[in-house]
Amino acid sequence: MVWFRKRRIDLGRYVGPESFPVVPIADVVEEGVLIAASAARLAMRNQAVVRILRDREDVDLDWYVAAGREQLALFAEEKAGDVARVEAEIRAWSRPRRPEKEEGERLERRHQMLIGLVDRLAELAADEAYMNALARTTRDAVVDEMRGAITFAALRSTAPDVAEGDERDAAITSLEEELRGLRADS
């Protein structure tokens, strides 16, 4: 039996990546605000659908504003807890037995970002214009979702046969036109 050795391929010498530019803390905070706003819209939307369908309650714009404020306050509270945790980590890293400078700098930067995010979320929760805009977009999304679900249920109950080919395309076009008309009416 003959043994063959694999040939080694010279891949060159490893060179680490160049350092990346540090993203400004204000930009990271604004990204965090976008994520928190998206999560707040989703939570408000879920709560509204449950209140409308299960509890049969009306949901007005004031309810959306209050629910949005509550969600942003919950996120700010959660991040305030993270600030306390990072502060404890910074105290632990600042002891003389911990020489890793990069880790301490990373923790300090994270601390600044979290404080900025907590402050910005509190600021936005108090901003009436921002909360009204958040409430309107969420309400519109809920209305669109409910309208779509009702339309789907109505079409399924009245026309259980599935159309195929050109007939299906014509039915979809007709439905799209009807939805445009409903959207224009609201």
Image (spheres, rainbow, N blue to C red):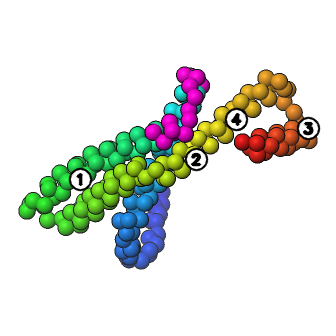
Which of the two discs, 4 and 1, sits closer to the camera?
4
Q: CA distance from mark 1 to mark 3?
A: 61 Å
State the extent of the magenta-drawn residues as a range: 53-66
Circle 3 residue: 167
Q: Are marks 2 and 1 in contact (CB under 8 Å)?
A: no
Q: Is residue 76 visible?
A: yes
Q: CA distance from mark 2 to mark 1?
A: 34 Å
Circle 4 residue: 147
Q: Residues within 10 Å of mark 4 (few under 14, many from 20)?
A: some
Q: Magenta stretch: residue 60 in it?
A: yes
Q: Secondary structure at mark 2?
A: helix
Q: Residues within 10 Å of mark 1 (few under 14, many from 20)?
A: some
Q: Position of residue 41 (x, y in %)?
A: 51, 44
Badge 3 amino acid: Glu
Of labels 1 and 3, earlier in sequence is 1
| Residue 133 vs residue 174, the one in the foreground | 133
Circle 2 residue: 137
Q: Position of residue 101 (x, y in %)?
A: 19, 67
Q: Secondary structure at mark 3?
A: helix
* Rendered image: mark on residue 86: 1
Q: Are marks 4 and 1 in contact (CB under 8 Å)?
A: no
**Is 175 left, or right, of 106 in this rendering?**
right
Q: Residue at x 39, y 69 (%)?
A: 23
